[in-house]
Amino acid sequence: MGPPGHGRRGAERPAGRAARSNPPVRFDRLTAEAADDGWESPGPDRPAGPRTELARDASRTILTRNSSPDVPFDRSINPYRGCEHGCIYCFARPTHAWLGLSPGLDFETRLTMKPDAPALLRKELSRKGYAPAPVALGTNTDPYQPVERRLRLTRQILEVLAAFRHPFTITTKGAAVVDDIDIIAPEAAAGRARVAVSITTLDPRLARAMEPRAATPDRRLAALRALADAGIPASVMVAPVIPGLTDHEIEAILQAAREAGAVRAAYICLRLPLEVKDLFGDWLEAVLPGRAAKVRAAVRQIHGGRDYDPRWGTRMAGEGPIAELIGQRFSRAARRLSLDGPLPPLDCSAFEVPGQADRQLSLF
């Protein structure tokens, strides 16, 4: 049977959460349907929303490899599985099913952490024959989601990377990235680090509804400014662009990011794989019922009539008239604001296992 809390779609959203349901895990043979028997109605003695639960992840490796031709890195680190930011459109939600948990509320509330991540990373980087290449943080779930302020796993990972002089990139919707400027800035000065801040909308009310526990748009712009002031190459990711809902903000987001000190920009169109399709659809119907049909039609148009087209090369930007118009507008605005230039490659030449040079000298 699926995990507790599975319920009907379209239910009232729990306080501080984006998903309105816990759809069954697609690998389960049996499912459960929630029913209100009157005993668990919200009241003064019962919190309105589920609390965040944290479990230990027993993974024995920390570097995740990929060979996707449309992804600009071949290795990444995710210290957390699940994400308390709760972005309703998050393409990573379906990965929670591999844990036997729902991509709905479970993804936002039942997280796993990797407390052994720093030690595992040190071990993997120390292996004989390891060839360094930029490692990406924030490719699946956010390394600066709220729990990071307490656990500091991302910071410990950055300390290891800095000790090995290993290049890295960070992508985040969390303003807490500024807490680690003391580590990131020296690595950036050495050509080994850069950061991208993801901004979906400048409308705080829409952001609160779509991304209930991510940093507000203003705080993300402030983070961009702090990163830039520290000499860190800071980019803005307009992600996802949601046709019919946020695409009209492309130019405004790029302008605000440029004024905050961003040096480059990129974008990704909305993707709705597997369970995300229904979760996002339920959210639209509940929050923006008057626009739901228009948005869903536009999303299908950029993905060849489907909610999601998984083909490499088209899944990120889509295709067709709407996708082409989004791409043209983005390119023109980025060019006008000098946000379209290439960034120099990150330097891998200084990579060194700490203490290795001393051990080698001791042989003579």
Image (cartoon, helix red, strand yellow):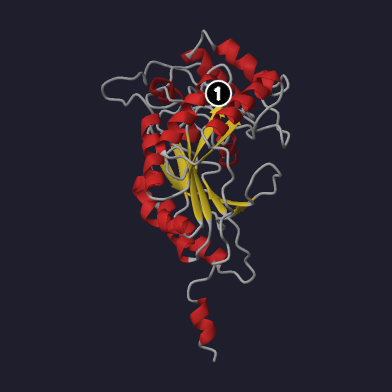
Image location of residue 358, percent across then percent down? 49, 81
Can residue 219 be spotted in the picture? yes
Residue 103 appearing in the image: no
**Relative to 304, does residue 119 appear above or below in the rendering?**
below
Q: Under tag 1, what secondary structure?
A: helix
Where is residue 308 drawn, in percent x and y?
67, 26
Residue 318 falls left or right of residue 359: right
Residue at the far top in the pictured view: 290
Residue 357 vs 182, above or below: the answer is below
- Please count the marks in the image: 1
Closer-to-camera residue (146/113): 146
The type of residue carrying mark 1 is: Leu
Residue for point 50% across, 27% down = 88
Residue at screen point 49% across, 33% down: 106
Q: Position of residue 159 (x, y in %)?
A: 43, 60
Q: Residue furthest bottom?
A: 364
x 68%, y 41%: residue? 70
Q: Position of residue 114 (x, y in %)?
A: 47, 52
**Based on the displayed image, in which of its 4 quarters is residue 101 positioned?**
top right
Seen from the viewer's position, the closer of residues 297 and 244 is 244
Report the front residue among 120 and 240.
240
Q: Which residue is mark 1?
A: 279
| Rendered view: 360 above or below 167 | below
Quadrant where the image shows the N terminus: top right
Quarter of the picture holding the C terminus: bottom right
Categorize mark 1 by other alpha carbons within 10 Å: few (<14), some (14-19), many (20+): many
Residue at horizontal 35 percent and vertical 48 percent from the top: 179
